[in-house]
Image: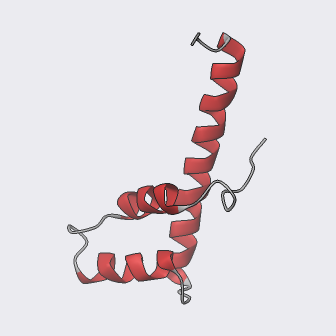
């Protein structure tokens, strides 16, 4: 088990940042246009009590709930 080359580690970090940005944008768009999906359901909880679940937490839940097959590939 070795460390990744710095350029590989940097690429992975950039991918994570891009994916988190995508999720925050998704949550922001769902806040205005709800559908029958997990993000909208979580935002309903946020609307009932913004302190119970923030929009950033909604994005985090979505990040952890997506399987590798459903995560968009950002390159």
Side of 59 relative to 5 (left or right): left
Horizontal side of 47 relative to 52 (left or right) equals: right
Q: Quadrant of residue 56?
A: bottom left
Residue with the most extreme bottom position:
36
Instruction: Name the residue at 64% across, 44% down.
Output: 18
Q: Is residue 37 above or below residue 64?
A: below
Residue 69 located left or right of residue 24:
right
The percent coordinates of residue 20 (x first, y second) are 55, 49
Q: Is residue 53 above or below residue 38?
A: above
Q: How many numbered callouts?
A: 0
**Near-viewer residue (37 or 31):** 37
Query: What residue is at 54 percent from the left and 77 percent from the top?
Result: 30
Residue 19 position in % (x across, y down): 61, 48
Q: Position of residue 24 (x, y in %)?
A: 52, 58
Quadrant (top left/top right/bottom left/bottom right) for the C terminus: top right
35 in relation to 19, above or below: below
- In the image, what residue occupies the spot 20% across and 67% down? 51
Q: Residue furthest front?
A: 1
Query: What colour-coding does the image apply?
Result: secondary structure
Identify the image quadrant of the N terminus: top right
Q: Is residue 74 visible?
A: yes
* View extreme (right): residue: 75
User: Which corner quadrant of the image does residue 72 belong to?
Assistant: bottom right
Residue 7, position as x, y percentages in the image: 71, 15
Q: Is residue 26 above or below residue 45?
A: above
In this rendering, position of residue 9 left or right of residue 54: right
Examine the rendering and report whether any part of residue 31 can be seen. Answer: no
């Amino acid at each position: 088990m070795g460390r990744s080359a710095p350029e590989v580690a940097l690429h992975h970090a950039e991918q994570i940042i891009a994916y988190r940005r995508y999720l925050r944008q998704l949550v922001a768009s769902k806040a205005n246009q709800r559908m029958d999906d997990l993000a909208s359901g979580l935002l309903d909880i946020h609307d009932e009590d913004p302190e119970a679940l923030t929009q950033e937490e909604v994005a985090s839940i979505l990040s952890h709930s997506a399987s590798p097959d459903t995560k968009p590939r950002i390159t």
